[in-house]
Amino acid sequence: MSTNTVFFYDRLVNDHNTNEEILQDLMTYPKAIKPKYFYDKKGSQLFDKITQATEYYVTRTELSILKDNAESIAHAVGDHTLLVEYGSGSSEKIRVLLEAVQPKAYMPLDISKAHLLNSAQKLADDYPWLEIHAACLDYSRQLTLPNTEYNHKVGFFPGSSLGNFEPEEATLFLKRLKQQLGDDSGLIIGIDLVKPVEILNKAYNDSQGITAEFNKNVLLHLNRLINANFNPELFSHKAFFNKEKKRVEMHLISMVDQIISINNQKIRLAKNESIHTENSYKYTTADFISLAHSAGLACTQRWVDDNEWFAIFYVE
Ligand code: AVJ
């Protein structure tokens, strides 16, 4: 029996503009699908499976940094806090922070409604003392946070999801986070660091094919969202580290010449043509500090693992 209720805010807008934007990205050359569309119910489940894959060091490494430095992070965060998580997914990492920080309230934000509700309810059961405000929304859009009584807001943006943005977009995004969180705020941000290319390539080409399935699943999501008829079996998964741009790129490669119908429009894909589905930018510590700086933010602390594969920064 649960006595701790979750306040829920449904703010996901899937409007005409969204569909137009998806269509535009598929009609320009090179074709692209924004990575936020990975996360339908199935996609969120597949992502959770990726985080368990041996080759995908990202989640495991970040979690170990959180655990090893929980006290120090809690000290940076301070008291009387509202923790706001951008892209909360299964809300697993936050557990470490909840225990160390003992915040007043927690506000998970996620684009995937079923996943968000599930995770928030589990958390409410496990932490009866915690006030939870869950908001289903697309955090890449302009937004105002649901109103609460807490002024000291600290953002948690884990997993290196910042890497999905182009560096210029990332700067604007960090500026916006600061505005959303207010004057008396801080930000805990997880950043995947530049590392040897073999490790990166393996992490996005796991041997069980989970990442490939995750990549192809975006097509099934679009089929429902914009009434398209993609057949995922006619695409192959491609992921590699682009050294010049310091990013892992994911693509879906059309294995045949084909025509996709989307509502009453037709889109042609040549054999071997790519749909670019994700960039995952990797940063050096210096790169990230200067990115934060360009957003008007200062990095006051950094926590890393022994290999320096991943870093968690506190920015103010
Ligand atoms: C959730 C964006 C951080 O880029 O590593 C994992 C997504 N894509 N495997 C990442 C992802 C392929 C992930 N982020």
Image (cartoon, rainbow, N blue to C red):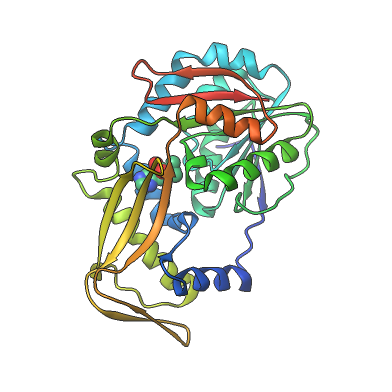
Position above or below: 19 against 66: below
State which image quarter holds ligand 1.
Answer: top left
Query: In which quadrant of the rendered view does residue 61 lie?
Result: top left
Query: Could one spot residue 131 in this view of the protein?
Result: no
Position above or below: 55 against 77: below
Position above or below: 215 against 298: below
Picture residue at 47% right of the left edge, 21% below the top: 66
- The image position of residue 152, as x and y in percent, is 75, 26
User: Residue most toward the bottom?
Assistant: 264
Query: Could one spot residue 158 in this view of the protein?
Result: yes
Picture residue at 49% right of the left edge, 18% below the top: 303
Picture residue at 31% right of the left edge, 62% below the top: 252
Q: Quadrant of the N terminus?
A: top right
Q: Which of 189/67 is in front?
A: 189
Query: In which quadrant of the rendered view does residue 65 lie?
Result: top left
Q: Is residue 223 left or right of residue 240?
A: right
- The image position of residue 107, as x and y in percent, is 64, 38
Q: Is residue 242 left or right of residue 39?
A: left
- The image position of residue 221, as x and y in percent, is 42, 65
Picture residue at 53% right of the left edge, 47% below the top: 116
- The image position of residue 270, as x and y in percent, is 29, 76
Q: Which of 307/232 is in front?
A: 307
**Number of numbered discs on residues:** 0
User: Residue most toward the front?
Assistant: 244
Q: Is residue 120 left or right of residue 143?
A: left
Q: Quadrant of the C terminus?
A: top right
Q: Is residue 153 left or right of residue 47?
A: right
